[in-house]
Image (cartoon, helix red, strand yellow):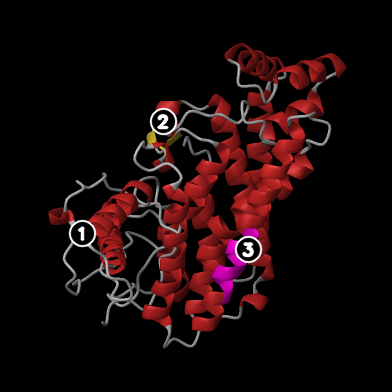
């Protein structure tokens, strides 16, 4: 099937949960005009706003990939299993800002300075979030109950996560095996997965230790968790995919990787801030970092600023699933003016990133990095 030779991997896609009926499944026919990047109204190296038309066509790619999974000839799906997978994918994968997936498209277009054709598009991501929700005991994701929280799902979600991950490998093999960069693309994904699950391990272990006391919590530990758990797959992976597709050697772009890792850390610090100070209606979930005893940027910064009496309050109340104790932690956050500390962090980080980006010798890569930064700077969700 001559469908796609470029990859949009890691998609936060947008659509509603399709009805759980066989009639709702997309046709398996070859898609037409799957993905064209929008025309830019000014210099293509400066304008990076994704159009609604691009997002709509991006969803066509999602529909095709879902269809490939539930009609995969390697497994004899019956109606029940096909409907389960159909429902699961529509529930978990769509939703959010499409940041990771669209960033591959945007990066490729900026680097190659031309539009993507019908043969240049694709997806990854949801299973990281599925497992993260299970391990954290989360209740909501993107404004709806977490998949594993549905009564008919429960721990079946663990196998669903494995299924999603295995499908990524099948996508890569089916559509990219003939490409010169195929092996490098596989290595990149394997490395991204290793980094991410290792970061998740540090996060979980840190939480278990933190429940006994917060003495080890620090900004450096928070940074280490974020670097592995978030930065690599959320920020470096999309750009690295685009670089491979235009024939670049990733070892020649260590500076780009370092900047993107820093950007990913900034992105997760934003999420840590939203967890406590964000509006759940805007963010799409109710924050539980305090109850879950997470080594978030907020608690690490609070411990850095607190006096001994305030540290005692944090140790007595942080990581407790008690509304009164959570309220005491939040009250102390306000007393320590963590909102102001966050604003200072955001301003200084943005300035440092801009300086690093401007120092890069490649105009095209500067445009890619600025595109990423523009998408996340002062975001509200």
* Label disc, if present, on residue 57 of the rendered structure: none
Q: Mark 1 — residue? A: 79
Q: Which residues are magenta?
A: 187-195
Q: Mark 3 — residue? A: 194
Q: Residue at x 63, y 50 (%)?
A: 200
Q: Is residue 263 above or below residue 315?
A: below
Q: Residue at x 52, y 42 (%)?
A: 134
Query: Considering the numbered disc 2 on the image, is that residue within a helix, a strand or a loop?
Result: helix
In reply to whether residue 330 is colored magenta, the answer given is: no
Q: Which label's residue is closer to the chain start, 3 or 1? A: 1
Q: Residues at badges 2 and 1 in contact (C-beta under 8 Å)?
A: no
Q: Is residue 298 above or below residue 23?
A: above
Q: Closer to us: mark 2 or mark 1?
A: 1
Q: Mark 2 — residue? A: 282
Residue 103 in view: no
Q: CA distance from mark 3 to mark 2?
A: 31 Å
Q: Residue at x 54, y 51 (%)?
A: 373
Q: CA distance from mark 2 to mark 1?
A: 37 Å
Dot 2 crowding, Cα within 10 Å, few <14, some 14–19, many 20+: few
Query: Considering the numbered disc 3 on the image, is that residue within a helix, a strand or a loop?
Result: helix
Q: Is residue 129 above or below residue 253?
A: above
């Amino acid at each position: 099937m001559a469908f796609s030779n470029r990859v949009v991997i890691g998609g936060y896609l947008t659509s509603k949960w399709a009805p759980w009926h066989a009639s709702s499944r997309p046709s398996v026919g070859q898609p037409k005009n799957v993905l064209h990047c929008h025309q830019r109204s000014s210099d293509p190296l400066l304008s990076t706003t994704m159009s609604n038309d691009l997002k709509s066509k991006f969803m066509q790619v999602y529909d095709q990939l879902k269809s490939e999974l539930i009609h995969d000839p390697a497994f004899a799906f019956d109606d029940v299993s096909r409907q389960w997978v159909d429902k699961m994918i529509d529930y978990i994968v769509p939703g959010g800002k499409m940041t990771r997936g669209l960033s591959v498209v945007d990066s490729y277009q900026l680097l190659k300075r031309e539009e993507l054709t019908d043969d240049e598009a694709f997806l990854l991501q949801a299973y990281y979030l599925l497992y993260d929700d299970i391990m954290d005991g989360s209740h909501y994701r993107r404004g709806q109950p977490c998949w594993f929280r549905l009564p008919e799902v429960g721990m079946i979600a663990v196998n669903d996560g494995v299924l999603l991950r295995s499908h990524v490998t099948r996508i890569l093999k089916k559509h990219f095996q003939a490409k010169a960069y195929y092996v490098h693309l596989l290595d990149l994904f394997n490395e991204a997965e290793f980094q991410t699950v290792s970061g998740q391990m540090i996060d979980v272990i840190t939480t278990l230790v933190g429940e006994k006391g917060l003495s080890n919590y620090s900004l450096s530990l928070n940074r280490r968790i974020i670097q592995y758990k978030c930065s690599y797959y959320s920020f470096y992976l999309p750009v690295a995919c685009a670089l491979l597709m235009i024939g670049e050697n990733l070892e020649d772009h260590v500076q780009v990787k370092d900047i993107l890792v820093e950007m990913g850390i900034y992105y997760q610090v934003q999420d840590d801030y939203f967890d406590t100070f964000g509006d759940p209606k805007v963010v799409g979930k109710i924050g539980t970092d305090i109850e879950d005893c997470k080594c978030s940027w907020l608690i690490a910064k609070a411990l850095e600023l607190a006096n001994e009496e305030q540290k005692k309050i944090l140790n007595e109340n942080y990581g407790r699933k008690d509304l009164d104790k959570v309220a005491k932690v939040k009250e102390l956050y306000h007393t320590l003016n963590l909102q102001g500390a966050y604003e200072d962090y955001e301003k200084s980080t943005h300035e440092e990133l801009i300086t690093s980006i401007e120092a890069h010798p490649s105009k095209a890569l500067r445009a890619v990095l600025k595109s990423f930064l523009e998408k996340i700077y002062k975001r509200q969700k």
